[in-house]
Image (cartoon, helix red, strand yellow):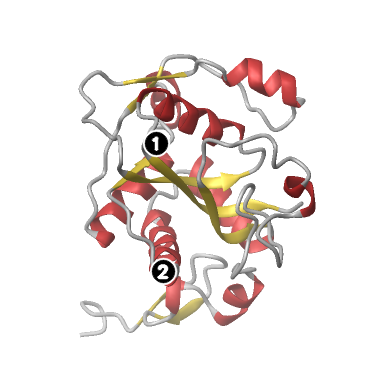
């Protein structure tokens, strides 16, 4: 009977044996090493006690096309290791637990969205990795929240990693990378939940939101990320 219905599973963080009832399939040690965020900066997602972190408060004149940013955790330690495995080591099974974390955050915030989407990737990038990890997250989350998953954008430009670039270089690299799919339904006056795994510079998410609002200026875009980089 134990073979058919095992009472124990392995922790997704350290592979130790745990009861299958453990939240997010984590052992107690790994769970308490993760910094789950209650409050974060509305703009960049960084952990803070105010609506805006100190850096973003000084940049309020620069209107972001993203209406609000929410982050579930801080990207370090156990979370960093797990997300790295999810992105680069084909640990696609983590999409189930990660989407549960996103789902619980969404429900705790009492959000009401019309659609879920994510940051698109090029066919070349998907073929190289074998899968689109953020699409796995968004599609599983859409099923759990019973919200339609849409793909309104196409990535038309290969881009290199942005984290090591300065602000101007990031802008030039990502500018014009996305365009609206002609088959997309009208998104004006709709609320769209944009899903991503990590928020580092935020440049890519901002460009996605800008491309959407360029065509649908009356839509609202809310960014929900699994983890935000430490500031």
Assess whether mark 2 and mark 1 are in contact (beta carbons under 8 angstroms).
Answer: no
Quadrant housing the N terminus: bottom left
Looking at the picture, how far across and down is residue 64, in whole percent?
58, 37
Looking at the picture, how far across and down is residue 208, in whole percent?
47, 30
Secondary-structure class at tag 1 = loop
Q: Nearer the viewer, mark 1 or mark 2?
A: 2
Q: Is residue 166 left or right of residue 181?
A: right
Residue appearing at x 30%, y 43% in the figure: 190
User: In this picture, is 69 found above or below 125?
Assistant: below
Q: Is residue 156 left or right of residue 73?
A: left
Number of residues whose C-alpha sits closer than 10 Å to that of mark 2, classed few (under 14), some (14–19) or many (20 or more): few
Which disc, if any, is residue 104? 2
Task: Out of 49 and 58, give the one closest to the viewer.
Answer: 58
List the residue tagged with mark 1.
132
Residue appearing at x 21%, y 30% in the figure: 185
Q: Marks 1 and 2, Cα distance to the nearest angstrom? A: 22 Å
Number of residues whose C-alpha sits closer than 10 Å to that of mark 1, classed few (under 14), some (14–19) or many (20 or more): some
User: In this picture, is 159 found above or below 79?
Assistant: above
Secondary-structure class at tag 2 = helix
Looking at the picture, how far across and down is residue 188, in whole percent?
30, 35
Task: Out of 168 and 230, give the one closest to the viewer.
Answer: 168
Would you say residue 10 is visible in this rendering?
no
Residue appearing at x 44%, y 59% in the figure: 98
């Amino acid at each position: 009977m134990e073979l058919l219905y095992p009472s124990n599973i392995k922790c997704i963080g350290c592979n130790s044996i745990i009861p299958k009832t453990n939240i997010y399939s984590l052992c107690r040690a790994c769970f308490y090493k993760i910094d789950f965020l209650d409050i974060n900066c509305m703009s960049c997602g960084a952990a803070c006690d105010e609506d805006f972190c100190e850096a973003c408060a000084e940049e309020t004149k620069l209107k972001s096309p993203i209406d609000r940013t929410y982050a579930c955790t801080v990207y370090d330690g156990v979370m960093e290791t797990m997300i790295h495995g999810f992105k680069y080591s084909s640990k696609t099974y983590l999409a189930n637990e990660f989407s549960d974390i996103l789902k619980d955050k969404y429900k705790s915030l009492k959000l009401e969205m019309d659609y879920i989407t994510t940051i698109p990737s090029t066919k070349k990038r998907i073929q190289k990795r074998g899968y689109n990890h953020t699409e796995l997250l968004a599609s599983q989350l859409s099923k759990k929240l019973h919200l339609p998953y849409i793909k309104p954008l196409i990535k038309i430009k290969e881009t290199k990693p942005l984290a090591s670039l300065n602000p101007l270089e990031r802008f030039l690299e990502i500018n014009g990378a996305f365009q609206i799919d002609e088959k997309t339904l009208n998104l004006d006056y709709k609320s769209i939940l944009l899903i991503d795994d990590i928020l580092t510079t935020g440049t890519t998410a901002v460009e996605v939101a800008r491309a959407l609002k360029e065509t649908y200026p009356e839509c609202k875009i809310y960014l929900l990320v699994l983890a935000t980089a430490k500031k």
